[in-house]
Amino acid sequence: MIVVNILRDGSVYPPLNQDKLIVKLLNGSLYIGKYEKDNYLKELDNYITEPENAFELKNELIKLINYEMPELFSKHYIVHLKCPVTISAKIKWETTSE
């Protein structure tokens, strides 16, 4: 698992893939999805757009984080991670029918 930093200008280091999938961990709460730079710059709390199967993926992430970096769950500040490929491959986005 790779920790990433979001800088003041909204850029991410190390850079995310084009699909911008990220994990946000804060006080035991977990968010997974697309990083929305514009929302981050507007200082909105919801700068991650979650997929429709986020609940199932979060369960997998909890197991993975507990195995690789369990200390992250005790942090009292926001930690961002690159979404592991094994998880991002399972993401299902809501489809809209027109």
Image (tube, grey):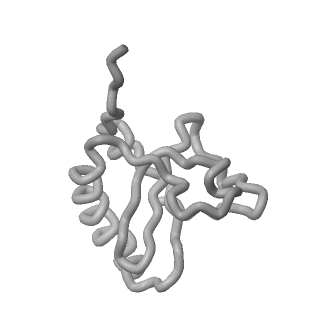
Residue at 33% x, 46% y is 87
Residue at 40% x, 59% y is 31
Q: Give the x, y percent position of residue 40.
A: 64, 57
Q: Is the residue 56 above or below the residue 94 in the image?
A: below
Position of 36 compared to 60: left or right? right
Q: Give the x, y percent position of residue 19.
A: 53, 36
**Residue farthest right in this picture:** 9
Q: Residue 63's image quarter? A: bottom left
> Of 2 and 18, which appears nearest the observer?
18
> Of 80 and 9, which appears nearest the observer?
9
Q: Give the x, y percent position of residue 15.
A: 65, 48
**Residue farthest top in this picture:** 98
Q: Residue 69's image quarter? A: bottom left
Q: Is the residue 59 above or below the residue 29 in the image?
A: above
Q: Quadrant of the N terminus?
A: bottom left
Q: Is the residue 13 above or below the residue 85 in the image?
A: below
Residue at 50% x, 58% y is 46
> Of 71 and 79, which appears nearest the observer?
79
Residue at 45% x, 57% y is 23
Q: Give the x, y percent position of residue 81.
A: 50, 60
**Residue farthest front in this picture:** 98
Position of 1 compared to 86: left or right? right
Q: Quadrant of the C terminus?
A: top left
